[in-house]
Image (cartoon, rainbow, N blue to C red):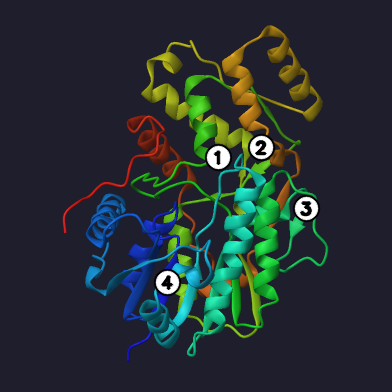
């Protein structure tokens, strides 16, 4: 019986990029993709294929869709809610589990974040522990688990929790601890912010970085709080997917933590804003004629004064923006650089980082074209 890889989160922000990369590789003859119940298999497959078609560029090898097998399940349930036949099939065949499913909205209720990111991870680990041929549990985590730490961030688990900017960071940290204690061959892949497709700008699920770009596009965020010299660590989503697909075929002994991140190549905040503003001025009349001004980078105290002024002025829209921004912008007050040595060893050299200016421009164009809104998963061709 040929072995297989099981992927959770196939319909999430990273999912289509990751599934496409796995289908372009042949280390695992079958790719089981976990989808929540509620839609037929034809709908799931058509929607995923349509997304993969949209993010694929000319010159890339076509994915082998005949190797993709949808599985109905939910990480919120024991045994992932699988029926006995599907469960036994996975237990006997799966060699690698890539757990990418997570709730990633920073402003989600803490209980929902815990259910998905902690309890959900527990359920997937319990299933993986019973896979008789398991070679690797690849946990997709986030560099956000560093919380309020500053300076150089090592590729390792910390014995004591940091303070965190939001509940999302805490629950992902807790998920890592569960994986580390599972007594399995575990590789933790901490991804930095995945901004979108390198050449297409394709974004499957808009997140916090895209909300920031949307506010910037509309001129809704006059100030940004940041420490002096703050950098933003972003990578193209394709880069993360390619690294994960390769890591799935690389053996791991015990526990390994890797930062799939720009690291020392992280972008100075002022350069990212200058690049985005320059792109917007070339694209949108409001920017071109000076109706919209770029935001000022300020310290924490100044930003708090601005928040209070907006509240006193009764600006409802600005107050909502600032409230949402408060869930993630404060992370810029804790400058850090992620070490990437272990991730580079898995890759076999320097990580294949994209030209961030080109990628950022493509993502902005994609966001403007789609009005920075999630699109329903569409049924494409079969």
Q: Residue 294, percent across and down?
A: 57, 21
Q: Residue at x 60, y 82 (%)?
A: 185
Labels 3 and 1: the sequence-earlier one: 3
Q: Are marks 4 and 3 in contact (CB under 8 Å)?
A: no
Numbered label attached to residue 327: 2
Residue that carries the numbered disc 3 in the rendered image? 151
For image coordinates 27% across by 49% down, the residue present is: 54
Q: Earlier in the sequence, mark 2 or mark 1?
A: 1
**Residue 82 badge:** 4
In the figure, residue 117 lies in which quadrant? Answer: bottom right
Mark 4 or 1 closer to N-term? 4
First in sequence, mark 2 or 3: give its number.
Answer: 3
Q: Residues within 10 Å of mark 3 (few under 14, many from 20)?
A: few
Q: Secondary structure at mark 3?
A: strand
Could you tell me how many numbered marks the image carries?
A: 4
- Looking at the image, residue 376 sits to the left or right of residue 90; the answer is left
- Label ID, residue 53: none
Q: Position of residue 239 (x, y in %)?
A: 46, 59
State which tag comes first along the sequence, 4 or 3.
Answer: 4
In the picture of the structure, the residue carrying the numbered disc 1 is 208
| Mark sitting earlier along the chain (4/2) | 4
Q: Residue at x 77, y 48 (%)?
A: 148
């Amino acid at each position: 019986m040929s072995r297989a890889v099981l992927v959770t989160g196939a319909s999430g922000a990273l999912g289509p990029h990751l599934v496409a990369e796995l289908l372009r590789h042949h280390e695992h003859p079958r790719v089981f993709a976990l989808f929540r119940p509620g839609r037929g298999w034809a709908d799931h497959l058509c929607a995923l294929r349509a997304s993969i078609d949209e993010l694929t560029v000319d010159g890339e090898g076509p994915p082998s869709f005949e190797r993709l097998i949808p599985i109905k399940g939910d990480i919120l349930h024991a045994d992932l809610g699988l029926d006995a036949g599907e469960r036994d099939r996975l237990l006997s065949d799966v060699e690698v589990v890539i757990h990418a499913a997570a709730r990633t909205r920073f402003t989600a209720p803490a209980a929902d974040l815990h259910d998905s990111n902690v309890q959900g991870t527990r359920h997937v680990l319990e299933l993986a522990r019973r896979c008789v041929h398991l070679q690797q549990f690849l946990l997709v985590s986030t560099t956000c688990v560093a919380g309020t730490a500053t300076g150089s961030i090592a590729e390792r688990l910390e014995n004591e929790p940091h303070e965190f900017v939001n509940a999302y960071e805490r629950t992902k940290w807790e998920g890592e601890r569960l994986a580390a204690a599972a007594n399995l061959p575990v590789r933790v892949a901490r991804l930095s912010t995945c901004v979108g497709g390198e050449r297409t700008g394709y974004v499957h699920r808009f997140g916090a970085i895209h909300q920031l770009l949307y506010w910037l596009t509309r001129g809704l965020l006059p100030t940004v709080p940041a420490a002096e010299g703050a950098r933003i660590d972003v990578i193209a989503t394709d880069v993360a997917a390619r690294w994960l697909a390769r890591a799935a075929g690389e053996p791991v002994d015990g526990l390994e933590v890797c930062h799939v991140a720009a690291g020392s190549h992280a972008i100075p905040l002022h350069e990212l804003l200058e690049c985005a503003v320059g792109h917007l001025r070339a694209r949108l009349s409001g920017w071109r004629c000076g109706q919209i001004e770029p935001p000022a980078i300020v310290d924490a105290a100044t930003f708090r004064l601005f928040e209070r002024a907006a509240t006193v002025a009764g600006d409802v829209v600005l107050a909502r923006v600032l409230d949402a921004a408060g869930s993630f912008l404060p992370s810029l007050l804790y400058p850090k650089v992620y070490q990437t040595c272990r991730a580079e060893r898995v890759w076999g050299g320097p990580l294949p980082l994209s030209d961030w200016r080109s990628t950022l421009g493509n993502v902005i164009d994609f966001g403007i074209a789609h009005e920075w809104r999630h699109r329903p998963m569409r049924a494409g061709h079969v």
